[in-house]
Image (spheres, rainbow, N blue to C red):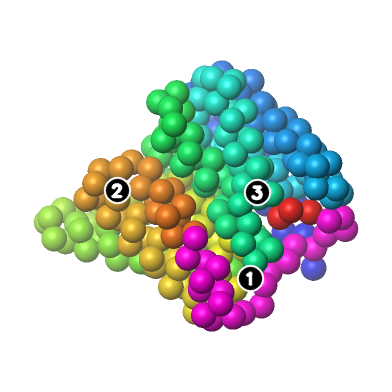
Amino acid sequence: MSDPRHLQIAILTGMLIYGLGWRDFPGPGWIYLLYPLAALGFQWGFCRIFRLGFDGRSPLISSLSLGLLLHTASAFWAVTAAFVAVASKFLLRIDGRHVFNPTNLAIVITTLATEQVWVSPGQWGLGAFLAVAALLGGMMVLRRTRRGEVTWAFLAAWGMLVFGRALWLGDPAAIPWLQLQNVALLIFACFMISDPMTVPDHRVARIGFAVLVAVVGYVLQYHFYVDEGLFYALALCAPLVPWLNRRLPGTRYRWPRTVPSRR
């Protein structure tokens, strides 16, 4: 089986080109080039420190995801986000694997640290065409990593919560339906929470983990009015994964690779 990271890089690159060309992403265009350059540079440096072979696929995926979700006009904070994403894989490890999704942790830390970076969930707009395109692209990757149940469990739980909220408030069903078509939500569901290197090893644990993230994210977003609630929820729940792996052991996912890599 070919490495699913190659397909993921192609899909994320296409989405970023579309965002820059047709969705009028905020901030200067060179920032979106700075993300991958900085991430690849930090990856090279850490590989030298830890005496590992260089593999640029992981930092490229993280940096493309940052470009899709995190915005800033500051070169310093763009580089900082790239550093946090790459450094977390090397420095924050339990049981031989990194604890946090690199992009997720970078978003959480930088949005907490400064108002010069922000996540704009509505930047993609709302629409069935873009939503279906993002979901199909994500499913193509998840089919190869065999972690699709994480995305489906999360979307099912999130859908039940937002539709339940609409029913409770007396809102029309069109409102939660449009919310589920948010492309940023689908990027989170297909490319972040389902990261095979940071989800639990056992299938049952993965499904439970996805539901927990949805519940925590819902509480943060709709009860505490935290716009980045889903990102914070994933970061808060991620430290539970090592415990879940010990309680429900499963087969650990490994990327096909030809050189030693921290991914």
Picture quarter containing residue 202? bottom right
Magenta range is 239-260
Residue 258 is covered by the magenta coloring:
yes
Residue 221 tag number: 2
Residue 91 tag number: 3
Residue 73's place in the image compared with 81, above or below, is: above
Quarter occupied by the N terminus: bottom right
Quarter occupied by the C terminus: bottom right
Picture quarter containing residue 122? top left
Residue that label 1 marks:
146
Residue 241 seen in the current view: yes
Residue 259 is covered by the magenta coloring:
yes
Picture quarter containing residue 123? top left
State how far apart marks 3 and 1 are (Cα): 27 Å
Looking at the image, which is closer to me, 195 or 125? 195
State how far apart marks 1 and 2 are (Cα): 29 Å
Q: Earlier in the sequence, mark 3 or mark 2?
A: 3
Q: Position of residue 234 (x, y in %)?
A: 45, 55
Residue 66's place in the image compared with 99, above or below, is: above
Does dot 1 land on a helix, a strand or a loop? loop
Q: Earlier in the sequence, mark 1 or mark 2?
A: 1
